[in-house]
């Protein structure tokens, strides 16, 4: 089937290509913090290990890697259950606007049926991503996100 879409768990064989995509993503205006290669490599290693808090997924089109996603689990007391954070979503430019994001969102809802909330972060200026997420049922949260960094990643 032409343009067959597949979403599968990230594997060790994907590490080099995922690292290349992560570097592009983390060097782009889509994120505030440019993470070091050391941190990105640890992210991938944790995704392909038995780390229970993060999972990595590969998006493929006709057997070719088209992108990747990483999810992290937390608990939301506000809704009394599991919250799935979509930490990373990157689709190579040549595979955008092919329905991969929508396929991923459906996949994640099936993969995490116990989830009571899904969350993601997006730059307001990234109008294409905001529109995509809204089409898939996401809404802008009225909360401000505050963080305290406990790692020096310079």
Image (cartoon, helix red, strand yellow):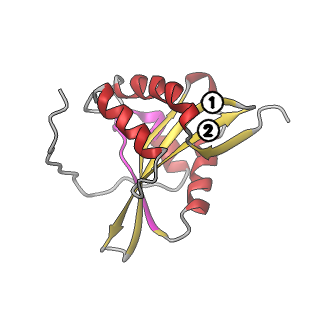
Is there any visible trace of residue 125 in the rendered image?
no
| Segment colored magenta | 116-129
Name the element at disc 1: strand
Q: Is residue 126 magenta?
A: yes
- Residue nearer the viewer, 85 or 128: 85
Q: Are marks 2 and 1 in contact (CB under 8 Å)?
A: yes
How packed mark 1 is, by other alpha carbons closer than 10 Å (few <14, some 14-19, many 20 or more), is: some
**What residue does disc 1 label?**
65
x and y percent of residue 53 in the render? 39, 56
Disc with the residue nearer the chain's start (2 vs 1)? 2
Residue at image location 64% in from the left, 44% down from the top: 7
Res 79 quadrant in image:
bottom left
- Residue nearer the viewer, 136 or 106: 106
Q: Is residue 35 magenta?
A: no
Distance between the alpha carbons at the discs numbered 2 and 1: 6 Å
Q: List the single residue furthest toward the bottom.
A: 80
x and y percent of residue 30 in the render? 36, 31
Residue at image location 56% in from the left, 56% down from the top: 108
x and y percent of residue 4 in the render? 77, 37
**What residue does disc 2 label?**
59
The quadrant the N terminus occupies is top right
Res 19 quadrant in image:
top left
x and y percent of residue 64 in the render? 68, 28
The quadrant the C terminus occupies is top left
Res 63 quadrant in image:
top right
Residue at image location 55% in from the left, 49% down from the top: 135
How packed mark 2 is, by other alpha carbons closer than 10 Å (few <14, some 14-19, many 20 or more), is: many
Residue 147 vertical position relative to residue 12 in the rendered view, above or below: below
150 relative position to 104: left or right? left
Name the element at disc 2: strand
């Amino acid at each position: 089937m032409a343009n067959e879409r597949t979403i599968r768990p990230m594997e060790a064989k994907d590490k080099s290509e995922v690292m290349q995509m992560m570097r592009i993503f983390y060097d782009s205006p889509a994120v505030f913090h440019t993470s070091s290669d050391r941190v990105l490599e640890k992210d991938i290693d944790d995704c392909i290990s038995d780390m229970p808090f993060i999972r990595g997924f590969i998006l493929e089109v006709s057997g070719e890697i088209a992108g990747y996603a990483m999810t992290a689990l937390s608990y939301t007391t506000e809704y009394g259950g599991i919250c799935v954070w979509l930490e990373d979503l990157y689709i190579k430019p040549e595979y955008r606007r092919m329905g991969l994001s929508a396929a991923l969102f459906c996949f994640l809802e099936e993969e995490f049926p116990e989830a009571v909330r899904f969350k993601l972060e997006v730059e307001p200026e990234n109008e294409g991503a905001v529109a995509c997420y809204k089409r898939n049922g996401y809404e802008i949260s009225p909360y401000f996100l505050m963080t305290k960094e406990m790692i020096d990643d310079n």
